[in-house]
Amino acid sequence: QVQLVESGGGLVQAGGSLRLSCAASGSIFSIGAVDWHRQAPGKQRELVAAITSGGSTNYADSVKGRFAISRDNAKNTVYLQMNSLKPEDTAVYYCNAVFGGLTGNYWGRGTQVTVSS
């Protein structure tokens, strides 16, 4: 059974930084594209950043220049480095991935990020 586990969330002051991790475990042949999404209270889940299996990245306009997504295939882990955090970045952050040989997308349970002003 494949699992995705997010970690690294917490409470930080505006202007601070956090690094989120998304670790995959289980019977994994290969990890394909991985996305980070977030959902703030009362709002729809939105795509924050994405990285392909080849390392190409894409970002939401709201986080460009502040967030960076990266991956360590040897560790089956994808990271989201978040700098210059703003109160509006407060949300539960989820990772989503596709895996070689498996159908469908897999989601983690999320990690809470709270940015105080």
Image (cartoon, grey):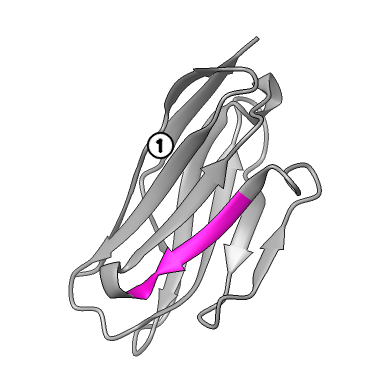
Q: How many numbered discs sit on the rendered protein?
A: 1
Res 116 → quadrant: top right
> Looking at the rendering, in which quadrant would you find the C terminus?
top right
Q: Residue at x 65, y 68 (%)?
A: 57
Where 12 falls versus 74 (above or below)?
Answer: above
Which residue in the rendered view is the most extreme toward the right? 61
Is 89 positioned to the left or the right of 104 in the image? right
Q: Which residues are magenta?
A: 68-73
Is 5 positioned to the left or the right of 21 in the image? left
Query: Residue 8 in the image: x percent, y percent?
Result: 37, 37
Is 3 positioned to the left or the right of 21 in the image? left
Q: Nearer the viewer, residue 38 or 20?
A: 20
Residue that carries the numbered disc 1 in the rendered image = 111
Q: Main secondary structure of the magenta part?
A: strand
Query: Residue 15 in the image: x percent, y percent?
Result: 64, 22
Q: Is residue 90 magenta?
A: no
Q: Residue at x 68, y 24 (%)?
A: 86
Q: Residue at x 54, y 31 (%)?
A: 17
> Looking at the rendering, in which quadrant would you find the N terminus?
bottom left
